[in-house]
Amino acid sequence: MAELDETHHGRLLAFLSAHSPARSTGPGSSDVSLWVGIHEADGRLVACGAISALPGSGAPLMVSVATDAALRGQGLGAAVTSWLTRYAVRRYGLCTLWQLAGNTPAGRLCTRLGYRDEDPCVAARIDAC
């Protein structure tokens, strides 16, 4: 696992656009404190994720975990998720995450790693009166 800085933002954006277009955030977001990635021996990025801050509380929030579509099912997402979880727990004492609705594989992964869906969050558009 490698920490990724601003020099990697272009590669991160291209990777996320190709493999996770519905991502929750992207490189350069002011609330992200850490990006990490897994690279192949040739330097190609194959998985990534970030730690952001939960709006309102500032609690660490795992975001934009993504895996190369051709390599899914090989444990890369689990490696990123596990690493970020351990990082956040060591540094902040907890780790939270949001999962996009309908992402069944991510749900299974999070459950397998010990996360529980105990506080469902529903988003809706509310028009001003």
Image: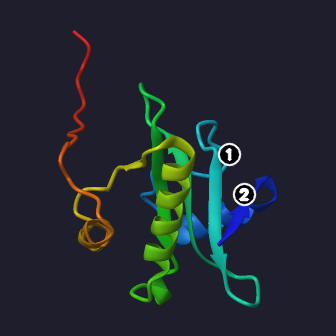
Q: Find residue 128 and report its image quarter.
A: top left
Residue 37, position in %: x, y?
A: 63, 69
Q: Position of residue 105 (x, y in %)?
A: 28, 74
> Looking at the image, is mark 1 or mark 2 earlier in the sequence?
2
Residue beneath disc 2: 9
**125 in relation to 90, above or below:** above
Q: Which numbered tag is attached to residue 97?
A: none
Q: CA distance from mark 1 to mark 2?
A: 7 Å
Q: Position of residue 47 (x, y in %)?
A: 56, 74
Residue name at image x 68 percent, y 87 percent = 40
Secondary structure under badge 2? helix
Q: Residue at x 23, y 70 (%)?
A: 104
Q: Residue furthest right?
A: 7
Kind of residue at badge 2: His
Determine the image quadrant of residue 28. Answer: top right
What SS does tag 1 mark? loop
Residue nearer the viewer, 3 or 103: 3
Badge 1 vs badge 2, beta-carbon distance below 8 Å: yes
According to the image, label 1 marks what residue?
28
Q: Determine the residue positioned at 42% across, 25% down.
A: 56
